[in-house]
Structure formats: structure tokens, C-alpha cells
Amino acid sequence: MQHSLESVWEGDLHCALGNMAPEGFWQGEYYFAACPLHEDHEWAFCFDRRTRNWQCEFGCGNGDLVALGVRLWQCGISAATARVLSLCGDEPRQVTSRYPYIDEQGQFLFEVLRYSPKGFATRVPASWVWNDIVRGKPTDEQRVLYRYPEVVLSMDVLIVEGEKDCETARSMGLVATCNPGGSSRWYRDYVDIFRGKHVKIVADADESGRRHARDIAGSLVPVAASVKLIEFSMVKDLTEWVEAGGTAEELAEFFRRVPALEPCDVAGWWDPLRTIRLECEAAFLLEGPPAVDTVNTVDQTMKEYSRCEPSVER
């Protein structure tokens, strides 16, 4: 894979930055350190993570990390680029997919980046540059569903976990969505969007995926026209199932056989305060024992009608 600094995860670039201008500190969006280009006792070096550019207050110059490397190591651009990448770690993460989120007016809000090796980041445009979101919790603006305008217009919506599965579903001719941030990030803000709609949910076949699907189902049963939930066996998610040979017709048949969930089926599934607690734990770095999770197993009710076996012998 050809490496480009523009597509390297911000966290990896921060690793390189710490090596090139060590012993600095972050203050908001800025990294301050002693300038590595001159004897500096004034913390004159400043790196802006929004623009990924640096400057020296004492006139050593400015530019991106490659420009710093050219000056620091007295080499050419190609050599400096290779050396910066080597400081990013053994295998820097590279962007493989970009998933845009837009509001009901079609206005672009932010995008989720998928990296290889597997990782995710979110970024919003700040003026003419990108503002990478590596730290901190989502803002209210970022609490929008993926492919939101399509969800608003459709009465039948498939909910999956992750943008990759959404795109897989869309390739099958379905209207699909997910929330940004993965599991445990289903907010009360999303619930009323599905009022009166027919909702189908595919749970990821792991504990966090099942818990996330239960959150969604439990929140939507009171407002949606119908809610159905399935989970594939032998594969983890919708994309893996399609890769194993699953078709839109088979998926429709699975959901046809599954009864719609009733309020009594989902009692206790949805805890709208859980995401708030998770944010508090992340914000304050609580180190005490975790709270008892009342949703740590899949109960028999869900097992009876939420598991469908895809045909893998083709």
C-alpha cells in the first residue's frame, strides 16, 4: 500500500510529532514544544492538529511534518516522508473508506473514516481544513444517523452496526442506516425518527453487538410500526453473510419468518441513561469497579426468534 501522510490516522501522526519535537504538551488543538531546529528554552514550536502544520515563533519556519523533517534531517522530500512514516509506528493506519453523514437538508456534517489495520475516526470540516476528532465525546451535531435523508423518506429501514454493513445493504437495494461510533452509542435523539416505520435490525454476532441491537429494538418498539431482529450464525455481520453468498431474497425471507417484537419482549432492553454513564466514565476516567451490567446475556426470548442460519453450502 502506498503511504500518504494525508491519509494517515491522526494518532499515528501524533506519535511521529512526539518523536520529532519531544517533551511537548497539548493545549486544546495545539502542541507546544521546544523547537527542534534551534536551541530553544521558550517553547517556540507550535503544531496545530486541525491543519497539521507547525510554526516556530522565532522564525525557523513553518509547514507540515515533511517540511519539518526536511529541515531537521537535512534530506529530500521523499526521504523525509519515509522517515516520518517510520516514526508513526510499525504499520501506520491508512484510510480505506470514507462515510459521509448529512442532515435532512442534505448538508454535509462530518465523516467517519475507516482505516487499515482496522480502526475508526471521525472528522468535521473546520473552515477549509479537516478537524480530526480523536479525543472527546460527540457533539449534538454529530448525533445524526448515517444516510439520514434516506431514512427520513423511507417507511422500511434496516439498521445494522457500522457504515460498512450499511453500504453492503444499500448494494442490495435496501435503505439502511447506523449510528456513528459503533455499539453502545444509540441515543434517545434517534428514536422519534422511526415513528411509524417498519424497522428491521441485524445484530452483530458478539456480546456488544447483541447488547447494541437490544438497545435499538427496546427503544423503537414503542414508536415504530413494527420492529424485527435477527442475528446470523456462523458469520459476524451482514457483510460477512453476503460474502458467504447471502442474497437480498434470503434476507427478506429471514425477516418474513421472524415475528415482530412486542413490548413485553423488550422489557428492560433499553436503558437511555447508559450512554450518558459511558460518556461520564470516559470523561472523568473513573477507575472503580464497573457497574453491574444488567444486560450481559441474550435471553431465551431473543434466542428463539432472532437467530437465523444462512445457507453457506452453495
Image (spheres, helix red, strand yellow):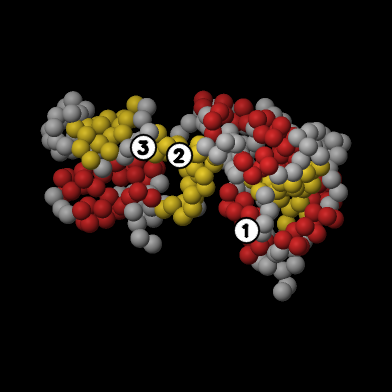
Q: Are marks 2 and 3 in contact (CB under 8 Å)?
A: no
Where's residue 113, x and y in %?
48, 47
Name which quarter of the figure residue 214 lies in.
top right
Question: Which three-letter amino acid code belongs to the residue tagged 3?
Answer: Trp
Name which quarter of the figure residue 184 lies in.
top right
How far apart are labels 2 and 3 at the CA level? 13 Å
Q: Give the crowd class for mark 3: few <14, some 14-19, many >=20 residues within 10 Å.
A: few
Q: Give the crowd class for mark 1: few <14, some 14-19, many >=20 residues within 10 Å.
A: few
Label annotation for residue 123 = 2
Of pointers 1 and 2, the one earlier in the residue sequence: 2
- Whether residue 274 sits left or right of residue 281 in the image: it is right
Q: Are marks 3 and 1 in contact (CB under 8 Å)?
A: no
Question: Which three-letter amino acid code belongs to the residue tagged 1?
Answer: Ser
Label annotation for residue 171 = 1
Does residue 1 lie above or below 56 as drawn? below
Where's residue 239, x and y in %?
63, 58
Secondary structure of the residue carrying tag 3 is loop
Q: Are marks 1 and 2 in contact (CB under 8 Å)?
A: no
Question: Which three-letter amino acid code belongs to the residue tagged 2?
Answer: Arg
How far apart are labels 3 and 1 at the CA level? 32 Å
Label 3 sits on residue: 128
